[in-house]
Each structure stands twice: as C-alpha cells, then as structure tokens.
Amino acid sequence: MNERQLRIDLAAAFRCFARLGMHEAVANHFSAAVSPDGRKFLMNPKWVHFSRIRASDLLLLDADDADDLAGRNDIDPTAWAIHGQLHKLAPHIRVAMHLHPIHATALACLVDPEIKPVEQNTARYFNRVALDTSFGGMADTAAEGARLAGLLGDKSRLMMGNHGVMVTSSTVGEAYDDMYTLERACQILCMAYATGQPLKLLSPEVAEKTARDWEGIADFSLAHFEEMKRILDNEDPSYAD
C-alpha cells in the first residue's frame, strides 16, 4: 500500500475511535510502517485531538533518527519511545495502535486481567494476548519501548497492566477491527463481572476453535473498516485531506 493510502486509512481510524469515545483527551497514538524494513513510519503529531486528524497531519518519521528528532515539539516522547522501538525491532509489524479504552483499561487494572472466554468476542483473544505487569510510569524512554516490543513475542496484542492496551497488525483495517472488538470483549466481560455471578466460561476447546475461526475471517475485519470509511466519506470526508 502506498503512503498516501496509509495516511488516509490511519486518519480514518483516528476519526472513528474519536466517535466511539475511545480517545484519551489529546493523548494516545497510532503508527503505520511505510518502508519495507519498518523504520520509516507514520504517526500522529503530539496533542492533536483524534477527531481533527487529517491524512496530511501525520508525521513521517525514521526510527534511526532519534538524535535528529530530539527537541521537536510535534512528537510525543511516549509515542516515539513505543512506536520508534516497535518498528525498529519488529519490522513484521506494519500497524500499531495504543489506546486507553475504558473497559480494556479497567480489566488491565485487575490482579487477573485475562480476557476470559465467555462468548465469541472474548474468545477471539483466548491465549492470544501478551501481558505486561510492570507498569513504571509513562513510557518515555527507548529502553521502555524496547521492553514493550519484546513482551509481544509471537502475539499481536499487549494488555498493558495498569495502563491500557496495544494491538498490532499487518493493515490499518485489521488493527482497527481488532481494537474495536477487544474493547467490546472487555466491556462484555466487565459487565458479566459486575453481576457478581460466577462466569460461565467456554471450554478451552471451544474457545480455541472460536479464536481460530476469527483468524480465518480477516476479510470481515477489512469490510468493517471499509464500511466505517464510507460513513466518514458521507458525513465528514475531511479526514482524507
């Protein structure tokens, strides 16, 4: 995918998540790799509200240019620390989204933050989420970014304990749908917990089968995102500017 289309898709994702109320004031950040080695990537500028981001606003950065970028006031240090290291160390990751959505973050604050498989949304994440249990404040150093990248291992999602969540993917559309469904899954689980009744867990066999079924319908994720872009095109196409 060319840079122009990546810019449009990433801007659309920001706008959609703002509409869903999943933004955190003017914080949080997404990125998308442009170069084959992942080192050149797009990222949102510092402290611009998701609902205003346009394709042309996105910064084109190079993970190898840390010294040259030092002191720039349009780059969030935590965004640079996380995404710069992620794209530098894991070139197979093309898109990364970090948010503090209410239900996923609430779950991340529990002693047991596992997304328990209680229905098909939660089962999508069965044994498929890495866990960070070492929150030490804002992630604003290269070392912390590298640590987070290492925690992902062979997984594409990271539940960031006492913090939030990160999803990674090969396309913006798949990452968008994954983040949307992860927050929906956490909302369902939080509401189930809130009843005070015991959870009726899916069996490991059924949960695993459901997770694999999800992995076989990437076209569903892409279709979801394309539909959201069509809604934006009808209501506020300025995201693509």
Image (tube, rainbow, N blue to C red):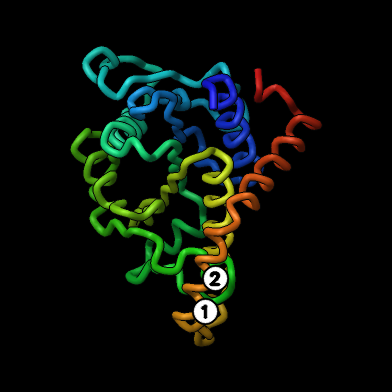
Look at the numbered disc 2 and give the secondary structure of its residue.
helix
Mark 1 near mark 2, Cβ–Cβ under 8 Å? yes
In the rendering, at what x and y percent does residue 95 appear? 45, 37
Q: Quadrant of the C terminus?
A: top right
* Side (left or right) of 85 relative to 165: left
Q: Name the residue located 65 percent from the left edge and 52 percent from the top edge.
A: 220
Residue 210's label in the rendered image is 2
Q: In which quarter of the image is residue 32?
A: top left
Q: In which quarter of the image is residue 111?
A: bottom left
Q: Quadrant of residue 34?
A: top left
Classify 10 Å Cα crowding around label 1: few (below 14), some (14-19), many (20 and above).
Answer: some
- Tell which residue pokes out farthest to the top in this image: 68
Tell me which amino acid carries mark 1: Val
Look at the numbered disc 1 and give the secondary structure of its residue.
helix
Tell me which amino acid carries mark 2: Thr
Q: Name the residue located 81 percent from the left edge and 31 percent from the top edge.
A: 234
Classify 10 Å Cα crowding around label 2: few (below 14), some (14-19), many (20 and above).
Answer: many
Identify the residue under disc 1. Answer: 206
Q: Is residue 17 above or below residue 10?
A: below
In the rendering, at what x and y percent does residue 223 appear? 68, 46
Q: In which quarter of the image is the N terminus?
A: top right
